[in-house]
Amino acid sequence: MSVENRLTVEQLAALVPGDPVTIETGADMSRPRQTAGTVVRADGPFISVRVRSPRGAAYVEQFCRRDGSRVGGRGRAELVNAAAHERSNEAYERTRRIDSLFRDWARHRTDVERLRALHEAIGECLESLTETASR
């Protein structure tokens, strides 16, 4: 779970019953998992969210209005911004391609074409990062 995709205090305060939310649960050794939920009640210091289990059972979890973290339960979970997660997935895919090209070039360091492909992928990644930063 990362800081850049957490809901802000203002976003948490603006939640009302019926609003869709995304819950991120952090596993110790694997990638975080996201689950969709719906706000059922948002009063006092807690936000109650209805969630469906992988087998379809509905249950309610409580989250702290102050920071969006789950109250009780096993493991850590928090309310997050789903759009930020999509952006991080795009960045992950770009860097994964660069890693793959680098490993390919590292096995054949004298191959100029592989080095060119790596260089182009890095350039494309930098261009997309500067485009998103200028928006």
Image (cartoon, rainbow, N blue to C red):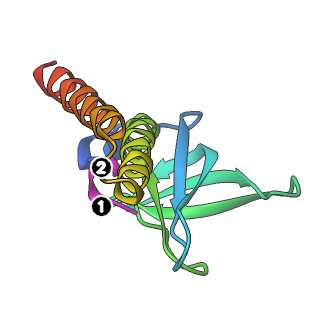
Verify whether residue 98 appears in magenta: no
Q: Amino acid at mark 1?
A: Arg
Q: Residue at x 41, y 59 (%)?
A: 107
Q: Residue flagged by tag 2: what amino acid is it?
A: Thr
Q: Could you tell which of marks 2 and 1 lies nearer the N-terminus?
A: 1
The verdict on residue 3 being magenta is yes
Between label 2 and label 1, give the one nearer the viewer: 2
**Where does label 1 land, which residue?**
66
Identify the residue shown where x is 40% and y is 45%. 101
User: Foreground residue, 13 or 35?
Assistant: 35
Q: In the image, is 127 to the left or to the right of 99?
A: left
Image position, residue 110 (x, y; %): 30, 49
The N terminus: image quadrant: bottom left
Q: Which mark is residue 110?
A: 2
Q: What residue is rendered at 31% in x and 53% in y?
A: 109
Distance of label 2 from label 1 (alpha carbons): 56 Å
Q: x, y percentage for residue 87?
A: 38, 36
10 Å neighbourhood of mark 2: few (<14), some, or many (≥20)?
Answer: few
Write down the quadrant of residue 91 in the picture: top left
Instruction: Please state, as top left, top right, bottom left or bottom right, where the C terminus lies in the image.
Output: top left
- Helix, strand or loop at label 2? It is loop
Q: Residue furthest left?
A: 134
Seen in the picture, residue 12 relative to 74 is either above or below; the reply is: above
Q: Position of residue 130 (x, y in %)?
A: 14, 26
Give, as a single range, the part of the protein colored magenta. Answer: 1-6
Count every numbered label the image shows and give the total: 2
Task: Place residue 122 in its image quadrant.
Answer: top left
Pick the residue in front: 95 or 34: 95
**Residue drawn at point x = 61 percent, y = 81 percent:** 74
